[in-house]
Amino acid sequence: MQLARSIVSTVLIGMSVLAAGAACGQAFPSKPIRIVTSPVGGTNDIMARLIAQETAAPLGVPVIVDNRGGGGNVYGDVVAKSAPDGHTLLVTGNAFWTGPLLRKAPFDPLTDFATVTLATTSPNVIVVHPSLPVKSVKDLIALAKARPGELNYASGQIGSGTHLAGELFGIMAHVKIVRVSYKGAGPALNGVITGEAQLMFAIAGSALPHMKSGRLRALAVSSLEPSPLVPGLPTIASAGLPGYEALQIQGVWAPAKTPAAVVNRLKDEIVRVLNQPTVKKRLFDSGLEVVGSTPKAFADFLEADMAKLRKLFQDLGIKAQ
């Protein structure tokens, strides 16, 4: 008799837990959703505002963009410490997980967040000053091997996409090209245009106008597959360095332990927005290709990219400060 009562009690408790979970799922969203991102004006801000504008009506609550300064450690920490209920999201890019490899962060990008979707990608493009006598990746590698340490490439700060793409190229091609540091990707690109530097692994969207004008010569893109952003350009992987890939990405995260049902609801709404023709075109015109992945695919990408970067930083002797 006591065993029977125990079984009934266990079943009732289980049903109560399931009912509570269902009620919680039905209640989402129960208040305004906040999207935390970087300062106004950048691609992260553009992405966050597009998502906010287009998801508010179907979700039935206001969706607010919360712009924060201070870098990824600041706004990442805000989201990591928020309630895991789906009402606080993070929209940002590569610096979110490369930053903690360079300097100590108050969170772990892999364990303190739930991936929602890999929203967009953008390849880097190898661009050279027209005076450099190369027209292909193989030409560039051959010239760099013939003149070790004499070629230089422009990049933004240490850990930026333009820096890491260049260093990865040097390691995989077994060539020594010297980094010329600039305050950001924009000044670095201007450095190549004016001839201060000879080449750059530039962000595709920024380099396109200068490629079209002839002020820069493009050699290849850093994605594994050819990019519609720069039609006709071969990939670095197919043009001389098999397996080479370096991408700029934008993604959406929630705090760790956000219920899977809530994460999937958010993913469905955000991916729907990303694939709207007008949104897709606006992002494409900004140099971004829509992906809209599943949470698991994004988590797998993130884990693999961090492992690759840890190895790269180890090879370069870069340690977290």
Image: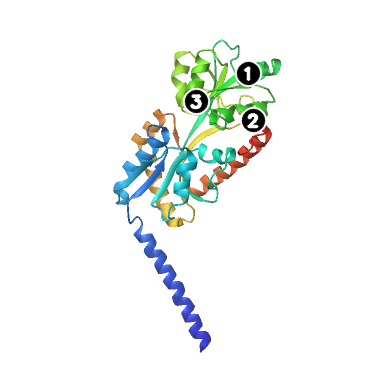
| Disc with the residue nearer the chain's start (1 vs 2) | 1
Residue on which the image places disc 1: 140
In percent of width and height, residue 275 lies at 39, 39
Viewer-nearest of labels 2 and 3?
A: 3
Question: Crowding near pointer 1: few (<14 within 10 Å), some, many (20+)?
Answer: many
| Residue placed most toward the observer, 83 or 110 | 83
Residue on which the image places disc 2: 242
- Contact (Cβ within 8 Å) of mark 2 with mark 3: no
The residue under the point 45% across, 48% down is 79
What's the residue type where badge 3 is placed? Ala
Marks 1 and 2, how far apart at CA: 15 Å
- The local secondary structure at tag 1 comes to helix
Marks 2 and 3, how far apart at CA: 26 Å
| Residue placed most toward the observer, 221 or 89 | 89
In percent of width and height, residue 60 lies at 29, 51
| Residue placed most toward the observer, 34 or 181 | 181
What's the residue type where badge 2 is placed? Pro
The residue under the point 53% across, 85% down is 3
In percent of width and height, residue 199 lies at 57, 19
What's the residue type where badge 1 is placed? Leu
